[in-house]
Image (cartoon, coloured by chain):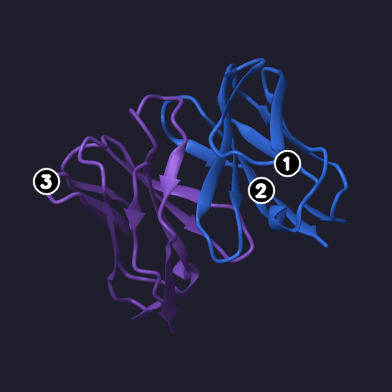
Chain colours: A blue, B purple
Amino acid sequence: SQTIHQWPATLVQPVGSPLSLECTVEGTSNPNLYWYRQAAGRGLQLLFYSVGIGQISSEVPQNLSASRPQDRQFILSSKKLLLSDSGFYLCAWSLAGEQFFGPGTRLTVL
Amino acid sequence: QKEVEQNSGPLSVPEGAIASLNCTYSDRVSQSFFWYRQYSGKSPELIMSIYSNGDKEDGRFTAQLNKASQYVSLLIRDSQPSDSATYLCAVPMYSGGGADGLTFGKGTHLIIQP
């Protein structure tokens, strides 16, 4: 069966610091991968998606970036965090439309 | 971009009753519809997918789709306190192809009263 991992589970970072969140998927090959953010009082917002290694599509202009260095690895990064980057970051995978979420990373920017 | 609307609630339902959650969407060409359950502090969990008009049943859950009215609902029979959560409705953002991200509603907060 497929499993999706995210780390860290929680993170507290100062404004202006860098960010790296990692997501890995087990038990499947060539999945579509997604990064979403859920901010307080707001719905889930798609940030990036990837259909293969090195292929990244961005949905929302922001100071975040994503990379997919391996088939089952998806990384979300920032060079300088803003207060508005606080939220619950969720990685998801899909093969045929249905999307399955990882446990998430709760990021607080102070 | 497609819009998905849900009543934020809270929707309070007595234990053992039927909980009815509703969702409307803006794009008439949407072909896939998903319901997720999200417990407080946890990630969303897919509970139902529906692609055709009519009803789809899975255990205590029934999804109902009416494409003409752009309306999808989720019924939970014999509601249990463990069903208390936020329920999110989602549709593919664009063409509905396999790589599409999803557009989510803001969710309905359901409370099952013992």
First in sequence, mark 1 or 2: give its number: 1
Label 1: few (<14), some (14–19) or many (≥20) C-alpha neighbours in 10 Å: many
Give the chain letter at badge 2: A
Q: Disc number at residue A89?
A: 2
Circle 2 SS class = strand
Q: Is residue A41 above or below residue B14?
A: above
Q: How much space separates mark 1 and mark 3, taking CA atoms?
A: 39 Å
Q: Nearer the viewer, mark 1 or mark 2?
A: 2
Residue B111 is situated, as x and y percent measured from the top left of the image, at 44, 76
Q: Disc number at residue A72?
A: none
Q: How much space separates mark 1 and mark 2, taking CA atoms?
A: 9 Å
Q: Disc number at residue A6?
A: 1
User: Can residue A24 be seen at all in this image of the molecule?
Assistant: no
Question: Which residue does the numbered mark 3 point to in the structure image?
Answer: B68
Q: Is residue B21 above or below residue B45?
A: below
Question: Which of the image's four quarters has the N terminus of chain A?
Answer: top right
Identify which residue is drawn at 63% across, 25% down. Answer: A27
